[in-house]
Amino acid sequence: MKNVYQLISLCLLMAIATAANGQVRQVTGSVTSELDGEPIPEVMVRVKGSLEAVVTDEAGQYSIGVPETSSLILTFSHDDFDDEEISLGGRTELDVVMTSNIRYNQYGMEVDRNTLVSEHRDGILVFESLDQDYMMWLDLRVQADGALFFGDTYNDIGNGVAMRRVRIAFKTYITENWEAEIDMDFADALADLKDAFIMYKTDFGLDFKLGNYKERFSMENNISSRWLTFMERPAITRMIAPSRHLGLQLHYYRPYMMAAGGVHFQDVGDYEAVQDRKDNNRDFGVNEGYSLTGKFTLIPYYHDINKGLHFGIAGSYRTPKTHQRLDNVRFDSRSNININRKKYLETDWIDQVDHYILSNFELAGYYRNFRLAGEYTQAKVHRFNDLPTEDFHGFYVMTSVLLFGGTHLYNTYQGEFTQPINGREWGDIELAARYDYANMNSTDHRVAGGAGEGLTIALNYYTRRNVKFQLNYGYLNFDRYANQRGRWYVGEDVDGNLTTDPFRVVAPEGEAGENFHWLGARFQVAF
C-alpha cells in the first residue's frame, strides 16, 4: 500500500511539472523612439535565447508568448536603433523606448557608423574597426638634442640644446585600398607642414600617391627620422637630395624590387617658401617649376629577414622653383649636428639656370646584426647662354652593428631600413661609424661653395620600445672655400689677420679652412 501512495505522489508531481512547463503568458506593449516618441514598426522582439520572434506593427505594437520557464528577458532590435534587453519579471505589459543609432555630421547628413576598438600596439595608440576595414593611429615624436664643440676654430661655436623635432602625425587606412596621412612639426617655435597626402593601393602592386611628401630619391633621406642611425643625415644628402614637395607619384612594388616615379612641384610646407612663391607669381606671372623624379631598387634575398642586399639608382630632372629666385638654384647645408647653425657649405645663388639633373647610386647590405651602406650623389646644373655646366658631388659610407644579437630590419616596400629588432628583452645597443664627403666647388672654382669631410661615431641605446638614446662624436674638416658666402673666417692673410677670402689665405692648399670636434646627445621618445 505504501508503494501505491508513492507512485500516485510521483504521478501528481509529474503532472504539475508538465502543466507548469506548458504555461505561457502573453506579453504586450508598444515600442517608440526616444527622439520624437513616434512608434517604431518592424522591431524584432524575441525571448532571449529563442530563435522565434515577432515584429511590431505600424503602430509599434507587439504581442509575444513568454514561457514561464524561459529567461524572462525580452530583446528588441532594429537596424536604426540600439539593441535593448529588458528583464520582464512578472509583467504582462512592457512598453519600450529605443535609442536611435543614426548619427549626422555638421551638415545634417546621415553618416555611416562603425564601432572602433582602441588599444596600444608597442606603445602606439591605434583605433581599428572590428572588421579591420578602417584604422587610424597616432605617430608622435619628440627629439631633444644637446651638443658641445671643441677645437681651435677660426669662428666661435656656441654649445647648446634644442628641440630637434616635435612631430604630430595622424595616419589612417580609410578602406582596404585607401591610405592618408597628415604630419606637422612644431620645433623651433614654428608649425611646419611635413607629410599631407592620400594614397590608393591597387591589388596588383601599383600605388598612386598625391599630396606633399618626400620624393623617392635617396635611401638615407627617405628613412624616417625616428630610425636614423646618426643624429643628422650626411651633408651631401641634406644639400642635394630633394625633400618634400607637392606632387603625384606612382609606386610599383614586388618583394624583390621597387620602382617609383613622379612629377613634383613646389614646397608647400615652409611658410617662407610659400610666401616667396606667391610673391614671384604676383610680381612676375611666371610658371612654377617642376621636377621629374624616379627610382629603381633591386632587393636580392628578399625572402630572408636575417640577410639582404640593396641596389638602388635614382635620377631627377628639375627646373628652378618659383619659391627661389627666378632661374636660380642654391645648394647649402648645416654641419652634422643641428645645434651648430652655421652653413659652411653653400654655393650661393647660381643664376641663369635652365635645369639641373640629380643622380644617386646606393649600395647596402645586412646580415643579422651587421649593416653596411653607402650612397654617391651628384648634381649637374645646366645654364643658359652657353654657360658651362656646374658639377657638385659627394658620398657617404657607414657601418653599424647591434651588440646584443639584434637584427637590422629592412622594409622591402619602401626600399629602406626601419626599426631594428632588439636582441634582448631590455632592448639593444648599436655601435656605428660613418664617413661623408661633399664637394660644392665646381670646375676651376667658378662656383666656390666649399668642400668638407666628416667622421661620425654613434652609440645608440634602443630601449624595449618607444625610447631611444643617442650619443655621437664627430669631426668636421672644411676647405678654405667653405665660408658661407664670405661670412666665416677660413685662415690668415699675409699680415697674420683672419680673413674670409679664400684667395687671400697664405696657408698652402689643404691646410686652411675650419675644422673642429663635437659631441652630441639625443633623447627621443616616439609613441
Image (tube, rainbow, N blue to C red):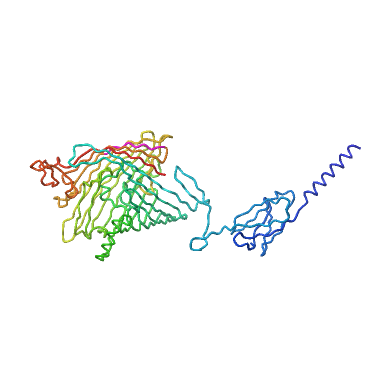
Residues shaded magenta: 456-463
In the picture, residue 290 is in which quadrant? bottom left
Q: Among all residues in the image, which is located at the extreme bottom?
A: 285
Residue 495 coordinates in the image, percent (x, y): 8, 42
Question: Taking 263 as reference, is 169 above or below it?
Answer: above
Q: Main secondary structure of the magenta part?
A: strand
Q: Among all residues in the image, which is located at the extreme top?
A: 404
Q: Among all residues in the image, which is located at the extreme left?
A: 495
Does the stretch in magenta take in 398?
no
In the picture, residue 42 is in which quadrant? bottom right
Residue 466 coordinates in the image, percent (x, y): 41, 41
Does the stretch in magenta take in 457?
yes
Q: Work out which quarter of the rendered image holds the C terminus and state it.
A: top left
Q: Work out which quarter of the rendered image holds the N terminus and state it.
A: top right
Left or right: residue 477 compared with residue 206: left
Residue 360 coordinates in the image, percent (x, y): 27, 50
